Image (cartoon, rainbow, N blue to C red):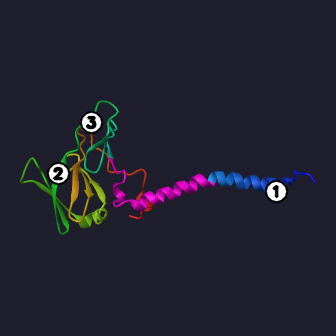
Amino acid sequence: MSKNKKITRKAFVVKASKLVCGYILLPVTVSSLSKCDAIVKSDDCNSLDLYSECPCHGARFNIEGEVVKQPYIGSANSPLKKYISNFSGETLTIFNPDDEQSSFIINIDDFPELFNIGGYVDLEANDIDGTGFLIYRKSDEDFTVLSRECTHAGCPVDPFTNPSVTRNQTGC
């Protein structure tokens, strides 16, 4: 008896196809499972990699306004200006640190993105800040309110973005 088994062309193609599909699908499956695992472990799914970027020089700022990526040119050590705010019922009052008599009030009902912890919005220019605000809801009563003015180039920074995880993927 011969030790070499002969295989038909059809059987060879079927086995080779299964092998190729396995090599292709295995990394995709493992990658998908690891992404789900990272999402489930997160306490605050919206803050994962959430940042705002200056379009003038590429510096990035986190939800606290701190520099997390240096600009293309020069260095960035100054965080975005942070405003004091007070949440009461359905209104968020943002205080102007330069003028104690001046404040900006928003009704949370007008911004459904802020209903939940981890929600965020960007607002256009207003009487307190000529570039607008970035607002992030940290807890039931606590909000982070940042100026959109880049402290390095003076450009208005982009709204918060999260390129690695979308809201639909996180279930938020």
- Examine the structure image and report whether residue 69 is included in the region drawn in magenta: no
Q: Which residue does the numbered mark 1 point to in the structure image?
A: 11
What range of the chain is rendered magenta?
Answer: 25-51
Closer to us: mark 2 or mark 1? 1
User: Could you say which is closer to the camera, residue 59 or residue 100?
Assistant: 59
Closer to us: mark 3 or mark 1? 1
Disc nearer the start of the sequence (2/1): 1
Residue 17 horizontal/vertical position (percent): 73, 54
Residue 131 horizontal/vertical position (percent): 23, 46
- Using the image, determine if residue 81 lies above or below residue 25: above
Identity, as a three-letter code, of the amino acid under mark 1? Ala
Disc nearer the start of the sequence (3/1): 1
Q: Label 3, label 1: how many angstroms apart (C-alpha)?
A: 63 Å
Q: Which residue does the numbered mark 3 point to in the structure image?
A: 76
Residue 126 shown left or right of residue 39 in the figure:
left
- Using the image, determine if residue 6 lies above or below residue 113: above
- Using the image, determine if residue 56 lies above or below residue 147: above
Q: Secondary structure at mark 1?
A: helix
Is the residue marked by circle 3 packed among few (<14), some (14-19), or many (20+) residues within 10 Å? Answer: many
| Extreme-left residue of the structure | 101
| Extreme-top residue of the structure | 74
Identity, as a three-letter code, of the amino acid under mark 2? Tyr
Q: Which residue does the numbered mark 2 point to in the structure image?
A: 83
User: Could you say which is closer to the camera, residue 71 or residue 95?
Assistant: 71
Closer to us: mark 3 or mark 2? 3
Residue 90 shown left or right of residue 166 in the figure:
left
Residue 29 horizontal/vertical position (percent): 57, 57
